[in-house]
Amino acid sequence: MNSQQSVTYVDLYIEVTKAITASLDLDEVFNLIAEKIPHVIGVDAATIRLLDASGKKLELKAARGLSEAYLNRGTIDTEEPVFQALKGEPMVIENAAEDSRIQYPDATKEEGIRSILVVPIPIRGRISGILRLLTKKPRSYTREEIDFAAALCEQCGIAIENARIFKEQQAQLNYFKTIHRIGKTINATVELDKILDFIVTNLTDVMKLKAATIRLIEPGKRKLELKAAYGLSQSYLQRGPLDDELATHYLKQGEPVVIPDAKKDIHTIYHKEAEAEGISSILAVPIAVQGEIIGILRLLTEEVRYFSDADINFALAVAEQGGVAIQRAIDYSKIRPPK
C-alpha cells in the first residue's frame, strides 16, 4: 500500500466510523452500515446479517442495492464462505454465479452478481455476524482492501453493541415505569378480575406480545385454573390442562421457564395447538406470595423470541407485585359480606 492509499483509507475509515457511531438507534445503525460501506469500498450492494440469540441462525438486518426476490431466495447459513467468515476469516468469491460454494447460483445469475466479499463482524470479541459486499462487475480484492473492510467491520461491531446497550437501557427504563404504573393500579382495587385483566392486557402491549394468560392454583385441588387471558382463541384456551407439562413442574419450584419454540419444546405438550394458534415462544413465570406459588403468568409471542434478562426480570417483578394484589383480593372476597 502506497502512502497516498494509506491517507485515503484513513480518511475513509474516519468518515465511516463517525457516520455509523453517530446514532444509537439500532435499525439506523444497520442502515448506515449498509449505505456507507459499499460507497467507500466501491461496490454495488451490501447485506448485514447477525446471528440470532441462539447463535445458530443468521438474520438479515439491512440491505442495499439488491432486489426483494434475491434477498428472499433462502437461507445462506450453510454456504462455505459464510461458514468460514463466521470462523473469523474474510472470504472472496470472484465468480459467484459459477462458484460451487454459492447455494443459489440461479438467483445469483438473475441478480447479475459477479463477485462477493464476505467479512466477519465481531462483537465483544466474538464473531456475531457477516457483512457481504457484492458487485455486478468482475472484481478481485487486494489484501489491503480486505483488511480495510475487516477494520470497518470491527467498528460496525462496536456501533451495533453501543446501540444494543442503549436499546436495552431504554427497555429497562420503560419496564421500570410500567412496574410502577401496574403496581399503582392493581393496588388500588380489591376486585380480582380487574387485577388479572389489567396485568394480561398491559403486559401484552408493553412487551409487544401476542397474548398473555394467568392461571391460579385452586386451593385443595392443587390444579391450575385459567383466570385471565388476552389475545387467544377459545379453542386454544380449552385445549386441556397444563398441570402435567414439564414447564409447570419447574414453575411450581419457583423457576421461570423460557420456551423458544412452543411447537416442539419438551417443556410443553400442546405442540399442534400452538402451531394452529400461531404461537412461537413462551415466557412463563411463577406467581408467588411469601414463598408460596399461587399461580403462573404465561407470556406468548407470534414470532420466535429469545427473551432477554430484562424481559425475564420485568415479568418476575410484575408477577411478584401481582401475587400480593391477587392474594389480597382473594382474602378480601372471603371476608366481604354477601350482597
Image: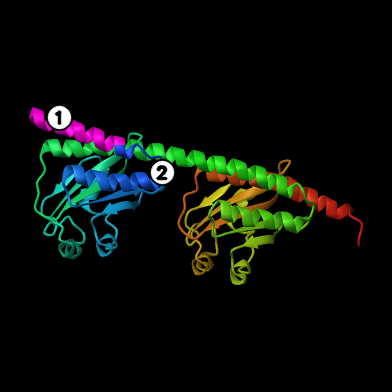
Residue 262 locus on image (x, y percent): 50, 59
Q: Nearer the viewer, residue 292 or 120?
A: 120
**Magenta residue span:** 1-18
- Indicate the quadrant containing the C terminus: top left, top right, bottom left or bottom right: bottom right
Please tell me which of labels 2 and 1 falls first in the chain. Answer: 1
**Residue 246 at least partly seen:** no
Farthest top residue in view: 3
On whether residue 5 falls in the magenta region, the answer is yes
Q: Residues within 10 Å of mark 1 (few under 14, many from 20)?
A: few
Q: Is residue 36 above or below residue 246?
A: above
Classify mark 2: helix, strand or loop: loop
Q: Residues within 10 Å of mark 2 (few under 14, many from 20)?
A: some
Classify mark 1: helix, strand or loop: helix
- Quarter occupied by residue 147: top left
Which of the colour schemes (rainbow, by chain, secondary structure, one colour) is used?
Answer: rainbow
On whether residue 52 falls in the magenta region, the answer is no
Q: Nearer the viewer, residue 230 or 241?
A: 230
Specify the principal SS of the magenta part. helix
Residue at screen point 51% across, 41% down: 170
Q: Nearer the viewer, residue 29 or 98?
A: 29
- Mark 2–mark 1 contact, CB under 8 Å? no
As shown in the figure, which amino acid type bears the numbered disc 1?
Val
Left or right, 154 with reference to 134: right
Residue 173 locus on image (x, y percent): 55, 40
Residue at screen point 55% across, 65% down: 270
The residue labelled by disc 1 is: 7
The residue labelled by disc 2 is: 25
- Give the Cα separation between the discs numbered 2 and 1: 30 Å
Residue at screen point 11% across, 43% down: 141
Residue 260 locus on image (x, y percent): 48, 54
Residue at screen point 74% across, 58% down: 193
Residue 22 locus on image (x, y percent): 35, 37
